[in-house]
Amino acid sequence: MIVAQRKPLDEIIAKAEPFKKVVIAGCETCVAECHAGGKKEVEILAAQLRIAFNRKMVPVEISECSIERQCEPEMIESCAEQIAAEEAVLSLACGVGVQQMAERFPNLPVFPGLNTTFMGTHSAPAKWEERCAGCGNCVLDLTAGICPIARCSKSLLNGPCGGAHDGKCEVSEEIPCAWAEIVERLTKQGKLGQLRQIIPAKEWDTARDGGPRKLIHGEAAP
């Protein structure tokens, strides 16, 4: 899932303050799962903004809506009439949802209420960790299901660097060395010899380095 966290309240207040009517639009999928942009977070932020603007005696009317997935154009339509009547949109979606909202309402200012961080997993209560860098050329079958691109600080493809110590990354003692984990898992599977196979230099043109990417599904495309 896409992981995000809310921007500082003061930053959001400054963005909303110039307008008289602002709608906070939540997104009920990824950012709801990480407690950043779901219906509950919309309600909390709306209450905080109303209190802040009342104290400042700034007449900003805050309304709320919640969309199942802001990244899907047809789902935005569920709140389109309400949004079109506002002066600005504060989107609590990931960066994809914010851009989709801005495309749907080109005459409205749309500003993000979240900072999109990474694609990750819920690893413990209130804790999410990065698991995928979306490189477009997956090697997880060669690395025991542990991604060296996203989980190794240096994105090394053929074993650890010289900085790892006691299974931890030299960047931080709180970061497990991805390659130490790969070796441990392959050892348990009796497949450590698999590491003798050199993973060739990666085709990075499938990653973000190759520019904005597109995917067209041949069978589903009209």
Image (cartoon, grey):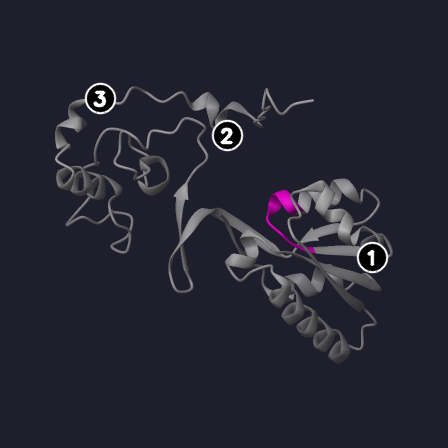
Decide which of tag 3 and tag 1 comes sooner along the chain: 1
Decide which of tag 1 and tag 2 comes sooner along the chain: 1
Tell me the kind of residue under disc 2: Arg
Q: Do the residues labelled 3 and 1 touch (CB within 8 Å)?
A: no
Q: How much space separates mark 3 and mark 1, taking CA atoms?
A: 56 Å
Where in the figure is residue 133, as x and y percent of width and height?
43, 38
Residue 212 lies within the magenta run: no
Q: In this view, does 200 lie above or below 100?
A: above
Q: Residue at x 78, y 61 (%)?
A: 22
- Residue extending furthest toward the right: 85
Q: How much space separates mark 1 and mark 2, taking CA atoms?
A: 35 Å
Residue under label 1: 82
Residue under label 3: 198
How many neighbours does mark 1 have within 10 angstroms: few (below 14), some (14-19), or many (20 or more)? Answer: few
- Residue extending furthest toward the bottom: 55
Q: In which quarter of the image is the C terminus?
A: top right
Q: Residue at x 81, y 68 (%)?
A: 60
Along the horizontal axis of the image, is 16 left or right of 155?
A: right
Range of residues picked out in magenta: 91-97
Q: Which residue is drawn at 31% across and 36% down?
A: 148
How many neighbours does mark 2 have within 10 angstroms: few (below 14), some (14-19), or many (20 or more)? Answer: few
Where in the figure is residue 203, as x and y percent of width and height?
40, 20
Tell me, for residue 208, which label it has, or none.
Answer: 2
Tell me the kind of residue under disc 3: Ile
Where in the figure is residue 184, as x and y percent of width and height?
16, 43
